[in-house]
Image (tube, rainbow, N blue to C red):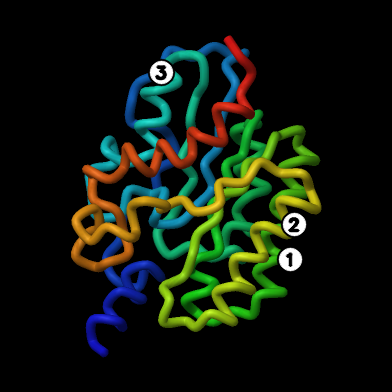
Amino acid sequence: MLRVLYLILCLMGLLPSATVVMAAETPVATTPETPTLLVWGDSLSAAYGIAVDKGWVNLLQEKLGDDYKVVNGSISGETSAGGLTRLPEALKTHQPAYVLLELGANDGLRGIDLPTMRSNLEQMVKLAQAAKAKVVLIGIKLPPNYGTTFTDKFDAVYTDLAKEYELPLVPFLLAGVAEDWDLMQADGLHPTAEAEPKVLDNVWAVLEGVLPTK
């Protein structure tokens, strides 16, 4: 019971968490014309528990090189409500061409009702699209102890939004990682540094088809 409570507190950010990262660690030579990718997520994108430069977001910057600027606006413990509150200012500041939206896991863990979560995600999609940004939706799955009925409805939030707004969807950020205990930190919820390239592969499998061919 104590282990389960610890796992939940870690993902919710109620235990010491990673600092907010608002820019990629890898230096990028940019120009005003360099397109910006804004990653908008929680601890799974904020490199919780590992060095920031080992996280999948920084690895994405390394992969893209100078062709794109990757800005990481992810915060450990973030909910869809918190993300919605912060997003307008981030869109104004960074003027991203792409928004990679990875939120909702903490809503599920906290038992926030799914219609509220869906509404928050939907509003963020609309805000990003109104700012002329292409949205990539990144899904996450809850631990099985939350029950099939709830987890199926949780999954459907992402698939339904992707279908309604014709969004590219990463079905599960931690596919092939969460199932392997050796690739997860001791808390059982966050990937190790060694797993982050696989996490990036999951994102890249979808993002590659979104970005224009150079």
Q: Secondary structure at mark 2?
A: helix
The label number, if any, that marks residue 28 in the structure image: 3
Which of discs 1 and 3 lies nearer the camera? The answer is: 1
Say if 107 sits above or below 82 in the image: below
Measuring from the top left, give residue 105's x and y in whole percent. Answer: 49, 66
Mark 2 residue type = Gln
Residue under numbered circle 1: 119
Residue under numbered circle 2: 123
Q: Earlier in the sequence, mark 1 or mark 3?
A: 3
**Which picture quadrant has residue 58?**
top left
Mark 1, residues whose alpha carbon is within 10 Å: few (<14), some, or many (≥20)? Answer: some
Measuring from the top left, give residue 139's x and y in whole percent. Answer: 55, 55
Mark 2, residues whose alpha carbon is within 10 Å: few (<14), some, or many (≥20)? Answer: some
Could you tell me how far apart the alpha carbons at marks 1 and 3 are, in whole angstroms? Answer: 35 Å
| Residue drawn where x is 36% and y is 76% of the image | 8
Measuring from the top left, give residue 44's x and y in whole percent. Answer: 40, 54
**Image quadrant for the C terminus?**
top right
Could you tell me how far apart the alpha carbons at marks 2 and 1 are, in whole angstroms? Answer: 6 Å
Mark 3 residue type = Val
> For this view, does 181 lie left or right of residue 83?
left
**Marks 2 and 3 in Cβ contact (< 8 Å):** no
| Residue drawn where x is 80% and y is 40% of the image | 130
Q: Secondary structure at mark 3?
A: loop
| Residue drawn where x is 69% and y is 66% of the image | 118
Q: Earlier in the sequence, mark 2 or mark 3?
A: 3
Mark 1 residue type = Ser
Residue farthest toward the bottom in the current orientation of the protein:
1
